[in-house]
Amino acid sequence: MLLALVLTGTFWLPSCPSHAETVGFLSVRDTWVTGADGRVVLLRGVNYVDFDDHPESHREADFARFAKMGFNVVRFPISWSRLEPVQGVIDISYLTKYVSRDVEWAKKYGLYVVLNIHQFKWAERFGGSGAPEWAVSEYARNEGGMREAVSSFWIDGEIQYHFIRLWTEIARLFSNEPTIAGYDILNEPWLYTSVIPGLDATYIDLLYLKVIKAIRTVDRSHIIFLEPANTNTFKLRSKEKVVWSPHFYPLSFASHYSSQDVERLEADLEAKYRRFVIDLKTPMWIGEFGASMHDEESRSRWLKDAIRLFDKYKVGWAWWPSSDEQIRNIPSWLAITPIQEEATKLVYTTVTVGMRNPLDNYLPVTLVVIDILIIYIIFSQVARRKSHHD
């Protein structure tokens, strides 16, 4: 595999510090997410779970801890079933009482927020969460019923109308809030092509376009985050303020993981990077990643390797904790280190995979110079702080 750095004229890539106050709306420039000042913002943080069952359990102290760890973004997996428990009646109080409260806490600690309509196994009726009961009540409470409900959603104009209307109201409420990084339309939009003949990812593209169009009637400022389906056309026409947000779980459910498996992780990330950044020329943000092995050593190795790869490819991320206990005990190696922060700021680069360019011959020297500059900057800062204290 060839990983080349395409240097674009200047060595300096200004970046918003992880704990900086969120000022102005985020936007998209080329393959980067940028701040209102035009500087690149690499979003790195955490998913804050339990918006479905226990949003009252959220605490301000958690946001303070997120910021202390150097994070600058929190993804909110919010609930369609809580937002529209009765067909046609949107419960705005869920947004104002819980979601807006957490947005204010995020703002206080300089954290951006990505709002996501979440689903897991599509609905509570099928042992998960997501769609309200009125939208799935006609389907059997089993795997087959779930597959039918999911597949029907992509061709059911009435159910989609409610989903689109829901996003319109969310965007209307937060249209003037720069703490919101953007809207993640739907978590893991899977297709079950065996249920409905001819069903393919063009139906997901069509829904995405409808939702984007509706959001833009009330909010032209925020980024739209789109998750790829298990089968995808990747032919979505809209690219205005669009970030593709795949999830990253290769080998994360294996019984064991060792660092010898890192090549399989990189192959997965490289394929995603090639598709979204190189081919589609859009930013890519890993909206979820995590490890679920039973032994802690495997989980630790997997997470450390994943973070190193994200740093290597210059992509942002949001870690997915599997429980309240994990959100209260975030692994220390997820914290953003000074070296990571300086590396984010230092070089104006676009990471490319398998693409030769005239500067390839100079790449090794360039990387050495970059490493020296990073070390020099860090030690200079340490020396100034020590001198100041003395």
Image: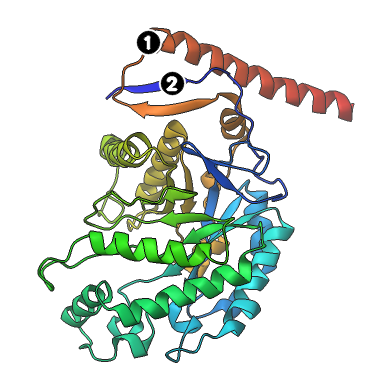
In-front residue for pair 343/388: 343
Can residue 76 be seen at all in this image of the molecule? no
* Res 358 label: 1
Residue 374's mark?
none
Q: Residue 105, relative to residue 246: is it above or below?
A: below
Residue 3: percent from left, percent from top:
35, 24
Please report whichever mark, 1 or 2, sits nearer to the chain's N-terminal start: 2
Amino acid residing under circle 1: Pro
Q: Quadrant of residue 60?
A: bottom right
SS class of the residue under badge 2?
Answer: strand
Residue position for label 2:
6
The C terminus sits in image quarter: top right
Q: Is residue 221 above or below residue 59?
A: above
Q: Are marks 1 and 2 in contact (CB under 8 Å)?
A: no
The image shows residue 307 at horizontal and vertical percentages of 45, 41
Q: Amino acid at mark 2?
A: Val
Decide which of 182, 382 is in the foreground and name it. 182
Q: Residue at x 46, y 37 (%)?
A: 31
Whole-Å distance between the Cαs marked 1 and 2? 9 Å
Tell me which corner region of the image, top left, top right, bottom left or bottom right, holds residue 40: top right
